Image: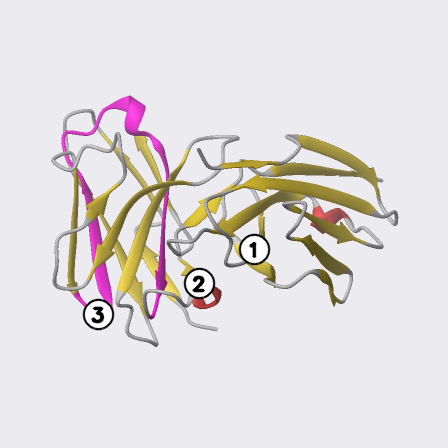
Amino acid sequence: GQNIDQPTEMTATEGAIVQINCTYQTSGFNGLFWYQQHAGEAPTFLSYNVLDGLEEKGRFSSFLSRSKGYSYLLLKELQMKDSASYLCAVIDSNYQLIWGAGTKLIIKP
Amino acid sequence: GAVVSQHPSRVICKSGTSVKIECRSLDFQATTMFWYRQFPKQSLMLMATSNEGSKATYEQGVEKDKFLINHASLTLSTLTVTSAHPEDSSFYICSTKPGQGDWQEQYFGPGTRLTVT
């Protein structure tokens, strides 16, 4: 079966750095997304990785290791507005999008 | 990026009634639209994939006679929850993308909060 694992919840302090991990076992791989979702709102696109390595975009970076079936989202200089759920999603060999359950990130002052 | 709208944003209905939710792609032709449902503190669950001019493809466990999907044009898809019950209360989100691949061009609507009393 296809499976994407993320921690259910994480807590971090304002101004700090947090890393949210995602591991996947899917039938093939054609890319991995990270989305941010605030409560009661639709997901918004953060990043897309299809090759191994680190993609940096401002305070957010995303890393991919295809051989390990592993990705992480790194958030730096955390702000209170970063409190949200972060969803990992993988495109499988059939070009279907498989969603993780999401990680709820709580930022404390 | 593309803009996707949903209407209504919130709806409260009585048990047994039907509710229609509209999803519009405002500035590009959406060959494919997706309907998701999200229960509190859970991730998105794909309900069905809607292709313009053809019947929707439903995910396993989703009743096609209860959740009617019509994708009559390249800019509009509708989801009708028929004979709604309290367990149908959820956050319904649509998304669109131009073609079969193009996942990087998937855009989400703002969602519709359905409460069935």
- Marks 2 and 1: CB-CB under 8 Å? yes
Q: Chain of mark 2?
A: B
**Residue at 51% in and 50% down:** A90
Q: Position of residue B67 (x, y in %)?
A: 19, 39
Callout 1 secondary element: strand
* Residue B74 circle label: 3
Looking at the rendered structure, the kind of residue marked 1 is Phe
| Colour mapping | secondary structure
In this rendering, which labeled residue sits more in front, label 3 or label 1?
A: 1
Q: Is residue B86 magenta?
A: yes
Q: For the magenta stretch, what is the residue range? A: B73-98
Looking at the rendered structure, the kind of residue marked 3 is Leu
- Residue situated furthest bottom in the rendering: B27
Q: Out of B13 and B18, give the one closest to the viewer.
A: B18
Against B8, is B85 above or below? above
Q: CA distance from mark 2 to mark 1?
A: 9 Å
Q: Which residue is mark 1?
A: A33
* Residue A109 circle label: none
Ranked by sequence position, the earlier of labels 2 and 3 is: 3
Q: Chain of mark 1?
A: A
**Residue at 14% in and 29% down:** B83
In this picture, residue B38 sits left or right of residue B82: right
- Quarter containing the C terminus of chain B: top left
**Residue at 57% in and 45% down:** A87
Q: CA distance from mark 3 to mark 1?
A: 25 Å
Q: CA distance from mark 2 to mark 3?
A: 17 Å
Q: Chain of mark 3?
A: B
Q: Which residue is mark 2?
A: B103
In this picture, residue A18 sits left or right of residue B96: right
Mark 3 crowdedness (10 Å alpha carbons): few <14, some 14-19, many ≥20:
some
- Marks 2 and 3: CB-CB under 8 Å? no
